[in-house]
């Protein structure tokens, strides 16, 4: 990484805490993301994979500065080499950093889709751009005059994709953009993200769908209980042996084509105080050292948070 | 609501008309029972204790005939209903005029008062509610919320008395009562005179409406501010005010309409008290006189007019919903 060609996005040691009042008005902090690190290089599509409740959406909200007010984030976030503070986020979001949200509820129910995609712009070039995007995503021109409740789930996602592409972003954060899409539409959306990344931009794809991530991503960050347990190039997912963390290996073996093996236990509840590795309780190779602090380290071109990994 | 547009507007109107007829029938029966079972003897109320004591049998019989107290209540009600269906609301016993005429005159006075209070409270409460909701938990929100809570718990007549005391007695900014200046010929009363006399009662009347609409609007705004589409608007870099005008107000409009039209009945109830305090010759004051004077035809007439007005307000709110809510509107087009 040089300054002339910095990573699109680097997140280092991000920690997010909610403060809340428990009974007796005692203020307590609830750590939901702990020591999270992930980066998106030029032309890279990085998938953040984790089950629900692992804190994936909060990462997206942090990057866009839309965390709730009782929520505090600490850590180092850099966008194009420059620190991303709140003021810079406010300038960049919606323009250079765009969000593709999860569902139709992110559209105003009482406003027609067209103006929402256009973000209230009315100039002819923008309208032409919007019409082109609708055509690209197979939405009929009439869609612009529909209200969100008149869209199918798949249409809504394509509308949200169009809204993101209306801008000229360097980074797209896609929060579960594909569930509910037909396979062909999902592939098209993924292809679109891929092409966008290839043009020298970055995509952070937040998903629980490991298979989808494997098809398009360059790098996969595996989330577990609010932290990244492993960041691996997609090629490492060809076999369990090339993977680093026991959780990633367990995920890999749970895929239908790799044996469909379930693994027992559940993810710890966000906010439960965890000492050491959050996966320790479910790990087949757990040892005493797992309950101590485990730093993230580089290993074979990836990152891992496990002292046993080789 | 949705079944209305799915079927037809005519069907909805027919259903509403039937409902209105039932409401009027119920309201008239209940008002009649209340006024005829009331412990107040209309003749005593009319002539006074001494007058009644000094009255001979013959005059008393005449009065009984005049107030109809010699006829059994059920028959009296049926007589009234029979005339009412033919469009005759009968004679007011106290005003010695046709009920229609009395209501017309009082209604004009009250309408100005209530309409002014209604519009004023609607606008002010909406603005306050939106401000409080958007800046939830700020100092502004706390001021607005506490102001509304205090107003909501203060009785209307008490507020009216305070207003009268402060503005009319101490500060002498507003007149002490009535709808027109005293000692001026009816023909010489200007619009400004009327507005001047209207201002304080209307302001007082709007205060109660403001409180509840502000608090309800605030709640709605807070709900909307927590919606995903607001989060997305923020993620797209929308600034606060474009977001408020473009999304929040748009989505708060529908519940605000319901609130605003539902407040008609509250304003109506409040007007009875406010008119009483300000000696304002409106429908509310006439209702009080009719109630304590045993003037059954007038009371029934006023009750029916009020019921019809409130009913009409709710009907209008529903129709507006159909025009504004795209979900209802589009379903109508599809069928």
Image: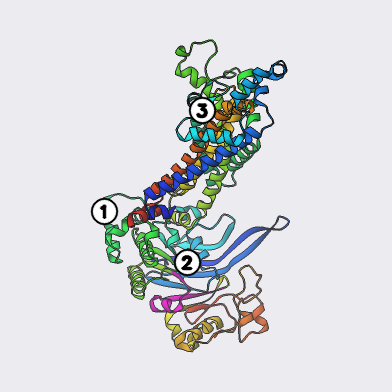
Horizontal side of B140 relative to B242 (left or right) equals right
Question: Which residue is pictured at 27% across the width and 59% down the height?
Answer: A141
Residue occupied by mark 3: B90
Question: Whole-percent x and y of residue B64?
Answer: 63, 24
Residue at position x 43%, y 51% from top?
B238
Nearer the N terminus, badge 2 or badge 1? 2
Magenta-colored stretch includes residue A217: yes
The picture places residue A243, in percent across and down from the top left corner, at 50, 84
Task: Mark 2: give few (<14), some (14-19) or many (20+) Cα within 10 Å.
Answer: many
Callouts 2 and 1 on one subunit = yes
Identify the residue at image location x=63%, y=63%: A30
Is residue B91 in view from this perspective? Answer: yes
Q: Which residue is mark 1?
A: A125
Q: Give how far apart the Cα atoms at labels 1 and 3 are.
A: 70 Å
Disc 2 chain ID: A
Tell me the tag on residue B211: none
Q: Which residue is the site of mark 2?
A: A10
Magenta-span inclusion, residue B123 = no
Q: Quadrant of the C terminus of chain B?
A: bottom left
Q: Quadrant of residue A219?
A: bottom left
Q: Position of residue A167 (x, y in %)?
A: 35, 58
Q: Which residues are magenta?
A: A205-224
Q: Closest to the observer: A246 or A74?
A: A246
Quadrant hosting residue A198: bottom left
Check the image and tell me how it is coloured. rainbow
Asked which secondary structure carries label 3, the reply is loop
Along the line of sight, the residue nearer the viewer: A176 or A91: A176
Element type at mark 1: helix
Observer-side mark, 2 or 1, equals 1
Badge 2 element: strand
Q: CA distance from mark 3 to mark 2?
A: 85 Å
């Amino acid at each position: 990484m040089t300054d002339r060609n910095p990573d699109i996005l680097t997140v280092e040691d991000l920690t997010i805490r909610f403060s809340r009042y428990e009974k007796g008005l005692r203020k307590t902090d609830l750590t939901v993301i702990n020591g999270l690190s992930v980066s998106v290089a030029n032309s890279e599509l990085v998938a953040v994979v984790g089950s629900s409740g692992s804190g994936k959406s909060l990462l997206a909200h942090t990057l866009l500065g839309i965390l709730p007010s009782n929520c505090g984030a600490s850590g180092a976030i850099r966008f194009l080499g420059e620190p991303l503070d709140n003021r810079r986020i406010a300038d960049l979001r919606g323009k250079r950093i765009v969000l593709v949200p999860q569902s139709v509820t992110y559209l105003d129910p009482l406003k027609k889709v067209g103006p929402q995609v256009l973000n209230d712009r009315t100039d002819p070039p923008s309208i032409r751009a919007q019409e082109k995007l609708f055509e690209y995503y197979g939405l009929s021109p009439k869609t612009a005059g529909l209200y969100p409740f008149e869209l199918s789930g798949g249409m809504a996602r394509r509308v949200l994709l169009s809204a993101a592409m209306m801008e000229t972003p360097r980074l797209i954060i896609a929060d579960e953009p594909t569930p509910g899409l037909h396979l062909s539409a999902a592939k098209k959306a993924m292809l679109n993200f891929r092409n966008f990344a290839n043009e020298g931009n970055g995509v952070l794809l937040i998903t629980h769908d490991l298979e989808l991530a494997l098809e398009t991503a360059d790098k996969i960050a595996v989330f577990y209980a609010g932290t990244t347990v492993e960041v691996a190039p997609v090629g490492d997912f060809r076999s369990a042996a090339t993977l680093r963390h026991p959780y990633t290996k367990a995920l890999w073996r749970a895929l239908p084509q790799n044996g469909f093996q379930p693994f027992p236990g559940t993810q710890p509840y966000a906010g439960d105080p965890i000492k050491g590795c959050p996966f320790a309780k479910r790990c087949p190779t757990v040892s005493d050292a797992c309950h101590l602090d485990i730093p993230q380290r580089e290993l074979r071109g990836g990152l891992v948070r496990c002292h046993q990994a080789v | 609501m949705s079944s209305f547009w799915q079927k037809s507007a005519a069907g909805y109107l027919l259903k509403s008309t039937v409902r209105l007829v039932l409401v009027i029938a119920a309201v008239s029966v209940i008002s009649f029972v209340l006024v005829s079972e009331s412990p107040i003897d209309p003749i005593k109320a009319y002539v006074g204790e001494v007058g009644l004591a000094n009255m001979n049998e013959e005059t008393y019989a005449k009065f009984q005939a005049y107030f109809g107290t010699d006829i059994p209540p059920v028959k009296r009600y049926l007589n009234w209903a029979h005339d009412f269906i033919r469009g005759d609301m009968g004679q007011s016993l106290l005003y010695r005029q046709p009920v229609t005429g009395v209501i017309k005159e009082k209604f004009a006075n009250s309408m100005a008062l209530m309409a002014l209070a209604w519009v004023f409270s609607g606008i002010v409460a909406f603005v306050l509610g939106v401000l409080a909701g958007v800046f939830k938990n700020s100092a502004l929100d706390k001021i607005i919320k506490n102001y509304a809570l205090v107003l909501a718990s203060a009785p209307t007549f008490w507020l009216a008395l305070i207003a009268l005391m402060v503005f009319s007695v101490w500060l002498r900014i507003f007149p002490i009562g009535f709808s027109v200046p005293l000692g001026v010929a009816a023909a010489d009363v200007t619009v400004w005179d009327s507005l001047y006399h209207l201002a304080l009662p209307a302001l007082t009347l709007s205060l109660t409406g403001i409180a509840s609409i502000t608090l309800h609007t605030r709640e709605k705004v807070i709900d909307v501010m927590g919606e995903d589409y607001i989060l997305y608007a923020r993620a797209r870099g929308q600034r606060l005010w474009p977001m408020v005008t473009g999304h929040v107000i748009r989505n708060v409009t529908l519940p605000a309409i319901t609130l605003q039209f539902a407040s008609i009945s509250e304003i109506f109830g409040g007007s009875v008290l406010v008119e009483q305090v300000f000696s304002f010759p409106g429908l509310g004051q006439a209702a009080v006189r009719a109630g304590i004077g045993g003037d059954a035809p007038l009371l029934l007439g006023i009750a029916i007019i009020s019921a019809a007005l409130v009913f009409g307000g709710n009907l209008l709110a529903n129709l507006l919903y159909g025009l504004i809510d795209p979900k209802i509107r589009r379903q109508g087009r599809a069928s």
